Image (spheres, rainbow, N blue to C red):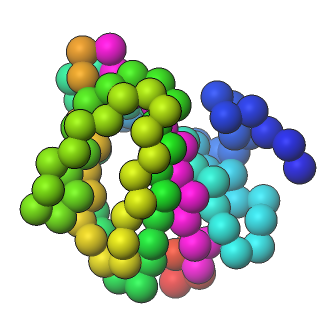
Amino acid sequence: MKVNINDIQGEIAKQDERYTVTDNKTLKNLVLSSTRLQPNCATNGHSHEGQEEIYFFVGGSGKMQLGEESINFIEGDVILIPDGVFHKVSAGPFGAYFVCVFDGKRYDH
């Protein structure tokens, strides 16, 4: 299956005034998820025991809290999130769009 990185063809998983999260659960073991984060807004932040993630920053810029570290990101950056590490994304003045890949077992609980 081919999808466009700007439209991953999933279903809206979360949506509020800060962001829209879309999840494509087509595959058996992995989920492709996208987040459109409004300017100067942030995600709640979270961690997943037993789960790693990869974030691909497709548009915008901002900061990501990764454990105790704060990492600036711009379009084209990729951030690897180790198992169980807290992470939170804060968009800059133009917002941010990112796509992530994670283990679909998260939805099996």
Label count reads 0
Tell me if residue 109 is in the magenta stretch. no
Outermost residue on the top side: it is 94
Percent from the top left, x then y, of residue 35?
Answer: 47, 39
Q: Is residue 48 visible?
A: no
Q: Would you place residue 89 above or below residue 7 in this image?
A: below
Q: Residue furthest front?
A: 77
Residue at left offset 44%, top offset 28%: 75
Judged left or right of residue 95, residue 107 is: right
Residue 61 x %, y %: 33, 26
- Residue occupying the far right of the picture: 1
47 in relation to 91, above or below: below
Is residue 97 on the magenta stretch? yes
The residue under the point 68% across, 52% down is 24
As rendered, which of 70 and 37 lies closer to the eye?
A: 70
Of all residues, the one furthest to the left in this rendering is 68
* Residue 45 position in % (x across, y down): 25, 55
Task: Judge by depth and name the residue closer to the eye, 84 or 10.
Answer: 84
The reply to whether residue 106 is in sight is: yes
What span is in magenta?
Answer: 94-105
> Does the magenta stretch mainly form a helix, a strand or a loop?
strand
In depth, the one of 61 and 104 nearer the eye is 61
* Left or right: 35 as drawn, with respect to 30: left
| Depth order, front residue of 15/47 | 47
Q: Residue at x 37, y 78 (%)?
A: 83
* Residue at x 32% of width, y 14% of height: 94
- x and y percent of residue 103 in the render? 58, 72
In which quadrant of the rendered view does residue 52 lie? Answer: bottom left
